[in-house]
Image (cartoon, rainbow, N blue to C red):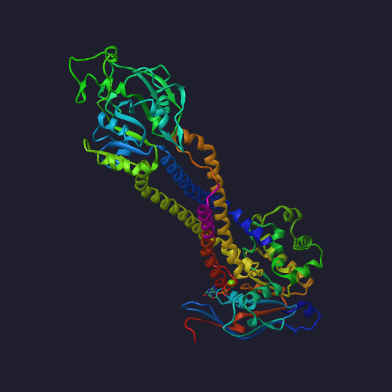
Amino acid sequence: MASPGAAREGKSPLDAVSFADVRYSWPGPSPFTLTINDFKLRNGEKLLLLGPSGSGKSTFLSLLAGIVVPDRGRIDVSGEDMATLGGAARDRFRVDHFGIIFQMFNLLPYGSLIDNVLLPIRFSKLRRDNALRGGALEDVAKRLLLALGLDETVIATSKAASLSVGQQQRVAAARALIGAPQIIVADEPTSALDRNTEGAFLKLLFEQSNEVDASVIMVSHDEGLAAHFDRVVRLQDIAQSQRGGRS
Amino acid sequence: MMIARLAFQSLLNRWVTALLTVLAIAMSVMLLLGVEKVRTGARESFADTISGTDLIVGARSGSLNLLLYSVFRIGNATNNVTWKSYQDIAKMPEVSWIVPLSLGDSHHGFRVLGTNQDYFTHYKFRHGQTMKFAAGGPFKDLFDAVIGSDVAEQLGYKVGDKIIVAHGVGSISFIEHEDKPFRVSGILAKTGTPIDRTVHVSLEAIEAIHIDWQNGAPVPGQSISADQVRKMDLTPRAITAALVGLKSRLATFKVQRRINNYEEEPLSAIMPGVALQELWGLIGTAETALSVVSAMVVATALLGMVTMILTTLNERRREMAILRSVGATPATVLGLLAVEGGLLTLAGVVIGTAGLYAGLYLAQPYIDHTYGLSLPIDPPRPDEWLKLGAIIVAGFLAGLLPALRAYRLSLADGMMVRI
Ligand SMILES: Nc1ncnc2c1ncn2[C@@H]1O[C@H](COP(=O)(O)OP(=O)(O)OP(=O)(O)O)[C@@H](O)[C@H]1O
Ligand SMILES: [Mg+2]
């Protein structure tokens, strides 16, 4: 298994993620096919991936996080080819290396905020060990939530289901960040937020990811967000999408 | 550990449906075990209706018919047995005791049985118990009657009360023997057998109330008063059946054959145990049907559980996607749901079993008293344990069905859950 501890010491390649000649089709009668010849995400980079709805942004992130496996080509994460990993190993690899934030519905509604934040810790020894360096797990989770602007009483008393969407996304960010994964993957995490909340959320997210040296790749169809990021990429510039019969 | 807790919380989150599912399973388990208990209880009560009697003798008829009217007071004899035949059988060297039974009259729907004192000592039930008197004693006077506990309870009789016997056995009798009332001399303790629903009088009394009757109707203008009848010869002309005890059981077949071949009158002798078996065989079909129905109820409950898990699956796809995004393997997702099915079933089985025993414990005295059915409160027998185990396994397997679907969804959903 890859060791991000080693990565921190500078032995890792410069790229957090690299795609080479990747091609993927969703199964089905009229599949959507995405082809990415070359793409790189650098360590510590904050990247915004733009593209219209239905262009394949989420598909791209699924490939990146190893949720789906490419039909062809190679995806390296921290220098490791994910295709060589078996199913369960890939699941473990994912939680070790990625913090994932969805567009919405990120939380288990019946769990407490702390429970929700600590979820990755339960599946990843690596992130657990990383988190434990900051003290007791509950304290680490709480500190993250506070840093992301959640109220102390809300943290102590609320169930996830009772939070506003903005609050939920902050909890999701805390979950993505805990245990210092190298890559934060966010699929339109702010699309349900208003402009002000959105700005505040991104600011806090970047602060915390700088804290742990994580790269951030976020997809959106909103070009207005570009100012917050190091680099902006359009999906149509790095990938070709195709619908219908396989070729 | 936390995952198990979250799974549990997820279930709590859906507690209404989960509870209803558990209750449905619990009820079905109660039904399944309850049917089993009633079955064994009924079978035992049934077999316990008569014991210690080696042969029942009546006019020639099928053995079931003879058993039904002589022991269960159901149906009627096709013919009588003459007093001479009765005495001939009594005189057989193998016969240890013989008790005559004379049926045909009734009191408010309860059968009236003419017999003698020996009946109270020789008729045995429930592993050889004999009848006991709850009040009073056996008949001493010609017009004394001993009533079963149900008769006393339902009609509110005490010792010393006067009762009038009606001719025929319908619950609405047409003609009553009102000129010759009886006095309740004793009330029997509850036996859980047809005895409870019987009015016992002496054989002579049966003769006495019919002395001025012919062909089932009073002879007009020829009424004989109760006082006159005491002075008359009341030796019965015929009886309906007789219970026979032998000195040695080994002689049973020999005596049976001799009675069946009795030349002066066509008679039948039956062994009560054999006839009971035959009767149970008939009822057994209904019994099997009952078991099948209760098994089907269990299957329905499990099906309900699968439906419940499947319908919640859509809203839980998010839950699955979240768990997968934090590193849960599809196998974890599969396990979670299968365990959920298993746990719901386990809870249902435990609650159902506990409920049944609690119910049995509470209701048993009542059921015994009201229906004469003593339900055994013993721990589940091996085959019942097996059934319970099979239900739990079936629950796990049933939980696997939605789990497999969730597994496929969690693989196909990718990054975004599309709802
Ligand atoms: N789980 C799936 N199974 C089959 N096909 C899928 C699946 N997910 C996506 N697709 C196909 O891939 C195409 C691209 O979808 P994707 O979700 O990647 O787009 P997107 O750019 O993220 O859109 P949006 O901005 O609306 O989120 C869709 O049109 C759909 O046909
Ligand atoms: Mg998308």
Question: Left or right: B382 with respect to B175?
Answer: right
- Foreground residue, B319 or B229? B229
Q: Position of residue A152 (x, y in %)?
A: 76, 55
- Foreground residue, B237 or B183? B237
Q: Position of residue A45 (x, y in %)?
A: 73, 78
Task: Determine the image quadrant of residue B392.
Answer: bottom right
Q: Is residue B386 magenta?
A: yes
Image point (43%, 44%), residue name:
B43
Q: Is residue A39 magenta?
A: no
Q: Position of residue B365 (x, y in %)?
A: 51, 35
* Residue sitting at the far top: B227
Q: How many callouts does the rendering have?
A: 0
- Considering the whole magenta stretch, tell me its main secondary structure: helix
Q: Position of residue A139 (x, y in %)?
A: 79, 60
Task: Determine the image quadrant of residue B248.
Answer: top left
Against B222, residue A65 (above or below) is below
Q: Which residues are magenta?
A: B379-393
- Foreground residue, B4 or B218? B218
Task: Determine the image quadrant of residue B53.
Answer: top left
Against B119, residue A247 (above or below) is below
Image quarter for ligand 2 equals bottom right
Image point (75%, 74%), residue name:
A214
Against B275, residue B95 (above or below) is above
* Residue sitting at the far front: B93
Q: Quadrant of the N terminus of chain B?
A: bottom right
Residue A171 at least partly seen: yes
- Foreground residue, B161 or A200? B161
Image point (34%, 18%), residue name:
B143
